[in-house]
Image: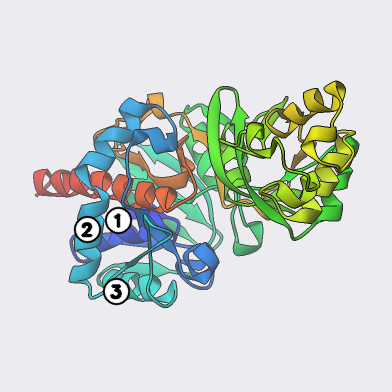
């Protein structure tokens, strides 16, 4: 069956692309029974769409690759587009845009928009080949021929929602390099030296974490597996292996305790159970600051400079996104078309672009889709 444009995937980038393309020009092929499955569970079911603060510095990616897309379709452009579709995101957590009630509001917008295109559900792409000027897309049901193919299949996170490595496999078959993939925006498991973290399961505190000179701040949540929370999820973007430093008391000065006779656990700006657990771990008796020995005073610095090496992460089943992916040096930053294969495009999470927590990955999905749509529309006009 002959198609103009085939979009592989039915997630955020694929849906935005199909919405922006002219009517009856694209076919979405999605392995799930419905579109936007991952959108529906994101942001606690409310979908963190984008952020008021936007720029290449919020991404693990090459700045010169990310910037053109963000400039072409900024967070303001996205909000304007959504409002035209009668979806009015609200700001929560100071800078983050969410759907007002649920993520289904965004999926409903896309379902309405993509009615102008052909949508194939419960159909799995197996391979893509190219001969002369046309691609052949083979699925578990039939073969399709298209002038243009867009890989918008996402990453490996949430395999229960049908995530697979098909996008990477297709790109590799056309000679593209794949930057090592790993779970990202995900919690850390811990070594036996940090098993005491598990006794604090459910407790949280504001900390600063430093990984390879990258500094992240936010809430750390202790869990029965290790640690999670926004600061940990952001830190997972930069961690590969080795030590991480935690400052449990950022901007805190010990001098304010001088002369106070209360026990440390009552004075520290941490939940008492956290304070007591850390004091025990650092070998410091819970007494007044004035009673501390010189050795204990020195050990207090561990509150600011606690080093540990994660055992690993919670894995793809818990990861918000996948870091790594198709090498962006082989993709045109202004069109998202392959530099190796004419007519082959890659957008969204399948590329080696990963944003921090806070709506950045959805913004990337939508911005890269916008660049791709712009170039495809030009191609369609030229082919008339």
**x and y, in percent, of residue 70 in the image:** 27, 41
Badge 2 element: loop
| Left or right: 121, with 199 as reference point | left
Q: Are marks 1 and 2 in contact (CB under 8 Å)?
A: yes
The residue under label 2 is 21
- Residue 257 versus residue 272: which sits nearer the camera? 257
Q: Which mark is residue 17?
A: 1
Q: Which residue appears farthest toward the front when viewing the image? A: 259
Disc 3 residue crowd, few under 14, some 14–19, many 20+, Cα 10 Å: few
**x and y, in percent, of residue 8 in the image:** 43, 54
Disc 2 residue crowd, few under 14, some 14–19, many 20+, Cα 10 Å: many
Q: Is residue 278 visible?
A: yes
In which quarter of the view is residue 237 placed? Answer: top right
Number of numbered discs visible in the structure rendering? 3
Q: Which mark is residue 31?
A: none
Q: Give the answer, above or below, for where 108 lies relative to 3.
A: below
Circle nearer the N terminus (3, 1): 1
Disc 1 residue crowd, few under 14, some 14–19, many 20+, Cα 10 Å: many
Marks 1 and 2, how far apart at CA? 6 Å
Marks 3 and 1, how far apart at CA? 13 Å
Residue under the point 52% across and 36% down: 325
């Amino acid at each position: 069956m002959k198609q103009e444009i085939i979009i592989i995937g039915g997630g955020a980038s694929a849906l935005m692309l199909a919405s922006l393309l002219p009517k009856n020009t694209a076919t979405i092929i999605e392995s799930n029974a419905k579109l936007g499955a991952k959108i529906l569970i994101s942001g606690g079911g409310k979908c963190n769409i984008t952020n008021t603060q936007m720029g290449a510095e919020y991404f693990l990616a090459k700045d010169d690759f990310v910037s053109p897309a963000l400039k072409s379709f900024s967070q303001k452009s996205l909000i304007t587009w959504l409002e035209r579709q009668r979806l009015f995101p609200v700001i929560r957590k100071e800078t983050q845009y969410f759907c007002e009630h649920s993520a289904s509001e965004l999926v409903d917008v896309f379902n309405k928009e993509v009615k102008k295109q052909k949508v194939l559900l419960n159909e799995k792409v197996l391979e893509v080949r190219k001969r002369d000027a046309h691609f052949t897309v083979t699925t578990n049901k039939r073969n399709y021929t298209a002038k243009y193919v867009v890989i918008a299949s996402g990453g490996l996170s949430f395999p229960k929602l049908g995530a697979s490595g098909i996008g990477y496999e297709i790109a590799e078959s056309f000679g593209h390099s794949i930057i090592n993939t790993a779970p990202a925006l995900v919690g850390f498991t811990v070594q036996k030296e940090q098993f005491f973290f598990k006794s604090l399961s459910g407790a949280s505190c504001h900390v600063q974490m430093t990984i390879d000179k990258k500094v992240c701040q936010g809430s750390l949540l202790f869990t029965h597996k290790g640690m999670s929370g926004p600061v940990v999820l952001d830190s997972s973007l930069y961690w590969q292996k080795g030590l991480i430093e935690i400052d449990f008391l950022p901007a805190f000065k010990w001098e304010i305790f001088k002369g106070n006779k209360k026990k440390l656990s009552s004075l520290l700006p941490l939940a008492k159970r956290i304070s007591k657990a850390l004091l025990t771990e650092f070998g410091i008796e819970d007494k007044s600051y004035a009673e501390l020995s010189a050795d204990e005073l020195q050990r207090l610095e561990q509150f600011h400079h606690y080093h540990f090496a994660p055992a690993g992460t919670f894995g793809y089943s818990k990861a918000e996104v996948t870091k790594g992916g198709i090498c962006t040096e082989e993709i045109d930053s202004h069109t998202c078309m392959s530099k190796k294969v004419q007519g082959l495009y890659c957008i969204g999470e399948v590329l080696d672009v990963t944003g921090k927590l806070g709506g950045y990955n959805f913004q990337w999905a939508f911005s890269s889709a916008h660049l791709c749509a712009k170039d495809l529309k030009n191609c369609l006009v030229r082919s008339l």
